[in-house]
């Protein structure tokens, strides 16, 4: 009898909902550090960097918000990921085409830039150095004034032959990661 009563309540509730009714789903809250994409084509190679772009918001950035000497996800939220559609040299390391996580270890004058084969990581909390495929020591370039409120990544391809760089810039600091596309 109880089962029959439940079936009747369910059937009546279905009749009360119009056939064309839609469920309203509220949009998600905007992210404080929205997802950004930098992309370029150098020769026949497509390069894409997907990252979350935190904002300065009157905070001290390098050495404080982003501590010196610690692995940083190089952005906010998920770890930054870099995709190369063909083999490239990053610094002096040859990388196969594919996607890599990008981590950095900032310091005042030199950053360690790391490309790692693990993907889909949240931050650098589960960073595993045994999965590194490339490490470079690169100098910072101090900027005369705060140029970037948002952490920004750009890709340029203005070095011959088939070379370029991925530039990380925020506040008054930038670092350029050199790469060279292999000829087809």
Image (cartoon, grey):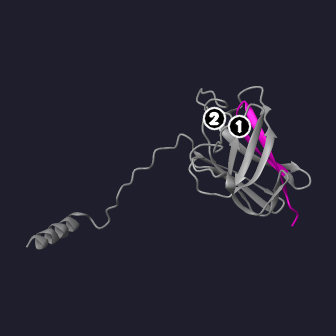
Rendering coords of residue 106 (x, y %) = 71, 37
In this view, the residue in front, 152 or 174, is: 174
Vertical placement of 26 versus 173: above or below? below
- Whether residue 101 is visible here, answered yes or no, is no
Question: Which residue is depicted at the point 64% across and 31% down?
Answer: 61
Question: Which residue is depicted at the point 53% across and 40% down?
Answer: 32
Query: Decide: marks 2, 1 in contact (CB < 8 A)?
Result: yes
Q: Quadrant of residue 4?
A: bottom left
Q: Quadrant of the N terminus?
A: bottom left
Q: Name the N-terminal-most of marks 2 and 1.
A: 2
- Helix, strand, or loop for circle 1? loop
Q: Quadrant of the C terminus?
A: bottom right
Rendering coords of residue 134 (x, y %) = 76, 53
Q: Which residue, given by chain and number where applicable, does mark 1 sit on?
A: 106
For residue 56, side relative to residue 109 (left or right): left
Vertical placement of 97 versus 104: above or below? below
Q: Residues within 10 Å of mark 1 (few under 14, many from 20)?
A: many
For residue 58, side relative to residue 29 (left or right): right
Q: Which residue, given by chain and number where applicable, does mark 2 sit on?
A: 66
Q: Residues within 10 Å of mark 2 (few under 14, many from 20)?
A: some
Q: Which label sits on residue 152?
A: none
- Helix, strand, or loop for circle 2? loop
The number of callouts visible is 2
In this view, the residue in front, 106 or 130, is: 130
- Span highlighted in magenta in the image: 164-184
Mark 2–mark 1 distance (CA, rounded to whole Å):
8 Å
Q: Does the magenta run of residues contain 11?
A: no
Magenta stretch: helix, strand or loop mostly: strand
């Amino acid at each position: 009898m109880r089962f029959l009563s439940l079936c009747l309540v369910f059937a009546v509730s279905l009749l009360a909902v119009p056939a064309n009714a839609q469920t309203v789903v509220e949009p998600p809250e905007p992210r404080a550090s929205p997802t950004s994409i930098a992309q370029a084509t150098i020769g026949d190679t497509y390069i894409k960097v997907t990252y979350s772009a935190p904002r300065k918001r009157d905070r001290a950035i390098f050495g404080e918000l982003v501590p010196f000497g610690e692995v940083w996800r190089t952005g906010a939220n998920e770890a930054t990921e870099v995709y190369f559609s063909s083999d490239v040299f990053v610094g002096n390391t040859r990388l196969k085409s594919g996607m890599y996580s990008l981590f950095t270890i900032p310091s005042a004058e030199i950053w360690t830039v790391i490309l790692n084969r693990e993907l889909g990581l949240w931050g650098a909390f589960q960073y595993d150095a045994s999965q590194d495929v490339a490490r470079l020591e690169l100098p910072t370039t101090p900027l005369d004034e705060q140029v970037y409120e948002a952490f920004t990544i750009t890709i340029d391809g203005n070095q011959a032959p088939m070379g370029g760089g991925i530039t990380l810039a925020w506040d008054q600091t930038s670092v350029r990661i050199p790469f060279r596309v292999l000829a087809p």
